[in-house]
Image: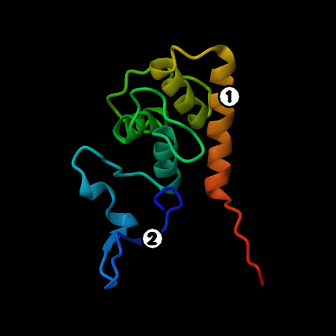
Amino acid sequence: MVPYAVRTTMFKLDSDFNGQVLRYRDISSKNDKLNWTGFGEVHVLLACIGSGCDYLDNLPGVGLITSTHYVRDAFSMDTTSTSRLDTSPLHPVEKLIQLLLRNHGRNLTPTEKRQYEQTFINSIALFRHPVVYDER
């Protein structure tokens, strides 16, 4: 539910209707290593996609913390960044994909890299514009 920016999610619900509540605004405060300070919904979505999701497998060695770091770097949110892509005219999402592939997609063929890029972009569209059916 996090990539969809659902404000409040209840999970681990038992038969007595007891469960845990996760509030979207509190996500980064649950983990000291995960810092989404300054992130908007799109940044959170990109970090989730980069770490692997239903639509796209993660690259080896990329989890949520690593993906978050790359989102900060791609969007120039990290003042200590030394990325060679900092002065690139690329769109930040293209920078993010290049960072992921350059650092973790070394063993992919050129075809697999193009497929990863396209699936990443498609994943953004699927999360931002979900299709919901109403049988009525």
Q: Which residue is mark 1?
A: 115
- Image coordinates of residue 116 in percent, x first then y, are 62, 30
Q: Which of the 4 image quadrants contains residue 15?
A: bottom left
* Left or right placement of residue 90 versus residue 73 in this view: right
Most extreme residue toward the left is 32
Q: Judge from the rendering whether residue 38 lies leftward or rightward of residue 101; answer left or right.
A: left
Disc 2: which residue: 7
Which numbered dot is residue 9? none
Mark 1 vs 2, N-terminal side: 2
| Residue 28 appears in the figure | yes
Please report the residue visible at 48 percent of the width from the left and 48 percent of the height from the top.
43
Residue 46, image x, y percentages: 51, 44
For discs 1 and 2, the disc positioned in front in the rendered view: 1
Q: Position of residue 53 (x, y in %)?
A: 52, 45
Residue 86 appears anywhere in the view = no
Vertical order, 45 against 26 (above or below): above
Name the residue rendered at 45%, 20% in the picture. 103
Query: Where does the C terminus fall, quadrant-wise?
Result: bottom right
**Mark 2 is on which residue type?**
Arg
Number of residues whose C-alpha sits closer than 10 Å to that of mark 1, classed few (under 14), some (14–19) or many (20 or more)? few
The kind of residue on which mark 1 rests is Gln
Q: Residue at x 50, y 55 (%)?
A: 3
Q: Nearer the viewer, residue 115 or 26?
A: 115
In the image, residue 57 above or below residue 41:
above
Q: Position of residue 12 (x, y in %)?
A: 34, 69
Mark 1: secondary structure: helix
Cα distance in 3D space between marks 1 and 2:
32 Å
Q: Secondary structure at mark 2?
A: loop
Residue lying at the far front of the rendered structure: 15
At 53% from the left edge and 52% from the top edge, which residue is drawn? Answer: 42
